[in-house]
Structure formats: C-alpha cells, structure tokens
Amino acid sequence: MKAPRAGARHGADLAFRVLAMSTLVVALVTLGALVFDVLGDGLGRLNWQFLTSLASRRPEDAGIYHALAGTIWVIVLTAALALPLGVAAAVYLEEYGTNSRLARFIEINIANLAAVPSIIYGLLGLGVFVRFMSMGRSVMAGACTLALLALPVVILSTREALRTVPKSIREGSYALGATQWQTIWHQVLPMAFPGILTGLILSLSRAVGETAPLITIGALTYIPFAPDGVWSPFTVLPIQIFNWVSRPQAAFKENAAAGILVLMALLLTMNALAVFLRDRFQRQGRS
Amino acid sequence: MNVATPPLASLAGLAGRNAGPQVASDSPVKIDAERLNFYYGQKRALDGISIQIRANLVTAFIGPSGCGKSTFLRTLNRMNDIIPGTRIEGTVLLDGENIYDPHLDVVALRRRVGMVFQKSNPFPKSIFENVAYGLRINGMARTKAELTDRVEESLRQAAIFDEVKDRLHESALALSGGQQQRLCIARALAIRPEILLMDEPASALDPIATQRIEELIYDLKKSYTIVIVTHNMQQAARVSDFTAFFWLGRLVEYDRTDRIFTAPAEKLTEDYVTGRCG
C-alpha cells in the first residue's frame, strides 16, 4: 500500500509546484508586458531636454524637471520628518513603554494607521496642515502629509530592528553603569541602524508613488516651475503623469510614458540604495 | 602513607596560595545578603539566601544548572531589574548600604560592581572603543591622553594588551573567544569597580584560554573582590578562597574552599563535590 500513497504525495507535490510556478509566471508576464508597453511609448521621448524642461502647453516642449524637483524636495523633507519621529516613537514603544496601557493603545492605533487608505491622509493633511496650520499648498504641507503616511511603516520596521539587537549587548552596557538612554543611543540604535534605514527607504519609495493624498492637498494645479523652498507650491511625478494621461492629445500620452520611466528609475534607485546601505552597514558591524 | 600530610592540607595550600586561610577569615565583609528571596513571576528562584562575601578574595558559587547561583550573582548588581516580571525580598548590603533601597542609584551601583558574562559580549566596535565606552559614558577621562592611558592600563590588567596593541582600532569581533572574554574583563576593569562578578566566564573557552582567565582572576583579587559562578568544581577549587554551594534555590553550605572540598558539613555538599549527585 505504501508505494502508491507515496506516489500520490509526489503527485500533489508536483502539482503544487506547477501551480506556484504558473502564478509567478502570470505575475511576471503582466509586469513585463506593462514595462514593455511603457518603454515602447516613452523611450523615444526620454532625453535630456525632457528631463530639464518645465511643463508646457506644447507636448514636444514639455518636460518633467519641475515634477522631478518637486518629488525630490518632498521626499527629502518627508525623510527628515519621518525618521526622527518614527525612530523616537519606536524607541518609546519598544524600550520604555513595553507593558504600559498607553503603549498598547498606541500600538493598536499604529497597526490600524498602516491600513488606512492614503486618501484619508490627504484629507487629514488638507484639514490640519494646509488649512489649520496655514501651510498652504506648499512642499512642507505635502511632506508633512507623506511623513504621516510613512510613519507607521517606519515605526514598525524600527521596532523590528530594535528587537534584533541581542540582549547580551544591552546587559554589557548596563553592567558598565550606562543609563537606559546611553545604552539605547550608543549601542542599540547603531546596531539597529541598517534595519531602520531599510525600513525608511522602503516606506519612502511607497510615498514617492503616492498621488491621492497630494491631489487632496492641492498639488494638482498647473505649476510650471520647480519649487525654490519648503513654502513653495509644487507638483510631483505621479501627479504630472496623471495630468498628462488625462490630456486628449496623443503626444502627451508619450510624455506620460516617459514620466513613468523616470519614476520607475527613481524607485529602483531608492530600493537599490536601501539594499546597498544595509549590506554596507552590516559588513561594518561584523568585520 | 604519610599521615602528617592529609589531603586536606594539600588542597588548603592550593586554595590559599596567596593570602593563606587565616588572612582569608580576617578579611572584612564586602557584601552581606540577608534572607534574600527572588521570584520569576510566581516561581521562586532563590529561597532565603544569607551570605557574607569578603573583600579582596575570590568567592565561587557552585551547584547544578538552575540552582539559582547565576540568579543570585545577578542580584548583586541588580542586573535582574531589567528582566520583566521579577520580584525580590530581603536585603543586600554593600559596605553596609542596602542596594535595594528605593533611593539608591542603580547606575552608580553598577559602576562599583562590574560584571563579566558567560558568553563574551564585545560591542560591535573597535577594541579601543569597547574599553573606552565605560570611561566615556561615566565621564571618567577628561582628556584624550587620559582615556588612552586608562584603556591601555585596563588591557594590561586583563593580560591582553600585548596581543592587541597593534590593532586597537580593529573590530573586537575579529578576536578569538578567549581574547574576547579577556577584552570584556578589561572593559569591566576600566571603570575601576570594587567588585567583579563573573558568570561562568570560562565555560565557552578551551583549556588554555580557561587557564589564562584563571591566572587573571588570581592576579586581580589583590585589587578586587571577585565573585565567580562556575560549573566546573576543579575551577572553583583552583581559583577561590571561599565556596558557596547552591541547591534548588537554597544556599546549602558556605565555607572556606578547602573545607567545602575536603570536609563539608552537609551530606548534600559532599555528594555533589564528589560527583554522586547533580
């Protein structure tokens, strides 16, 4: 009786492998087709002139410079806001408030926040930053909104990173008369840094692609110049792409495809940077 | 057979090579624990421990795994404070002052009571920075020259300076296990504690590295009060002046090391040291 049953088990194993493989193939083929389509439409339009020109009513003169500059302004400012806030919150939850009722309450809320649709963050940003705090439709308002959006992921990944620091390192530090803060600042955070950085960059690359919250706070207006400060109005790559796609002329569709290529290149660069930095810091820790 | 030289005398000579037994009993009391109970949640890990540990001597804690010897060691610098769900009753006096007084500064206590752990735990930094860390955080070196001097002095005290002097700024993680453990001892010595607690410091080391640690302990007791937890009874007999035998969270017997190993008062101690139980 044993041999046929073993055969059936091998059969099931094989079937599952084929199923998993075909799922993967479907996903990859779809992605490949999309990339191929965008490349076909946009590659011809992608040149130095496109990267350095501002928006224009004539598709052949229009460029992506203002949106690329806007995206970089917003993302740098978002990182500057989300990193200290996220790390501080994670340190509190993981190191100080481990068992307090307040910490558990905050924890549940952060888990919920991570699942909130991004348009809700846009409405919050519109109400709190643009109107109540009178930031206007500025880079600052956009960065504050995206920082809120990125925070749950930064907090969760920082907590994970803090948890990987071995207990023996903390004990070694305490045994030398270090305070809890000295232990966290000198030992725990440096060791957790690669993990924190990876989480930050990954959450930022999600924020780079966000359109909805920025449309809500008013970044969809026609802005033919690059921002010159944090209080300047701005637009970002996904919004510019959205704008071009909704134009009737076919030439603008080519611009949109080229814009998508620029956005994809930016995202891939950021993800590569995350991997590179993580490997580099890990090697520094070990050697 | 030579009747005038019973085994007791030879072992006593081994244990008290330096100070001699009569000096040992005259040494002042450094740590005085009184009816100490310790709980992990509901589980009682220490049951009424009372012991007087003497200054500038080596006291060894022996006993089977889970008997509470490491737990007791960690109550002496309040290292158990960082484990959630633990509770302590009783007092531990250090130079007559209760270290469990709610007004006592734990950070200041740990500066006076250094610790070396079972598994060497160098920080993932350079050899120099590992030793300098305690000095920096406690503000113990005012100038760079003073810092360098204290680091070098500590590395010499821990008998590792000659092996690492050419690579002080390389990572401590590249050192061998025995070297890492001596680095951790140097790190603990740098802030000049009065007491050095050692939790099975040689259990993960090979015999040669173990021997170097034991020689080091022998040298260090001139300046420090040393308490060492060990699984290895030969080690306890070699390095310690006093030995405490723990069994199921209780202190069964505490006496001069030569007496514990040759003429213990308790049957349980005798069974343990002769390998009949545990």
Image: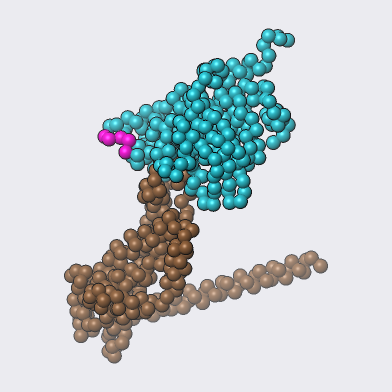
Q: Please determine whether, in this image, residue B34 is positioned above or below residue A102.
A: above
**Which SS does the magenta portion mostly show?**
loop
Q: Relative to B102, is A83 on the left or the right?
A: left
Q: Is residue A33 magenta?
A: no
Q: Position of residue B147 (x, y in %)?
A: 31, 34
Which residue corresponds to the image point at 39% horizontal and 54% vertical from the top-left?
Answer: A193
Q: Quadrant of the C terminus of chain A?
A: top left
A182 sits left or right of B221 in the view: left
The colour applied to the residues of chain B in this rendering is cyan
Picture layout, residue A271 above or below residue B18: below
Total labels drawn: 0
Which quarter of the rendered picture does the N terminus of chain A lie within?
bottom right
Examine the rendering and report whether any part of residue B6 can be seen: yes
Instruction: Answer whether residue A107 is visible to the viewer in this image.
Output: no
Q: Is residue B243 above or below residue B40?
A: above
Residue B66 in percent (x, y) is at 63, 42
Left or right, residue A158 beside residue B266: left
Q: Nearer the viewer, residue A115 or B258?
A: B258
Query: Of all residues shown, which one is farthest toward the bottom?
Result: A248
In which quarter of the view is residue B258 placed?
A: top right
Say which of A190 and B55 sits in front. B55
In the rendered structure, the colour chosen for chain A is brown
Q: Residue at x 66, y 40 (%)?
A: B248
Residue B76 at x, y percent in the picture:
50, 37
Q: Start and end of the magenta stretch?
A: B139-143
- At x 53%, y 29%, the residue is B53
Colour pattern:
by chain
Residue nearest the viewer, comparing B261 with B275: B261
Is B169 placed left or right of A101 in the picture?
left
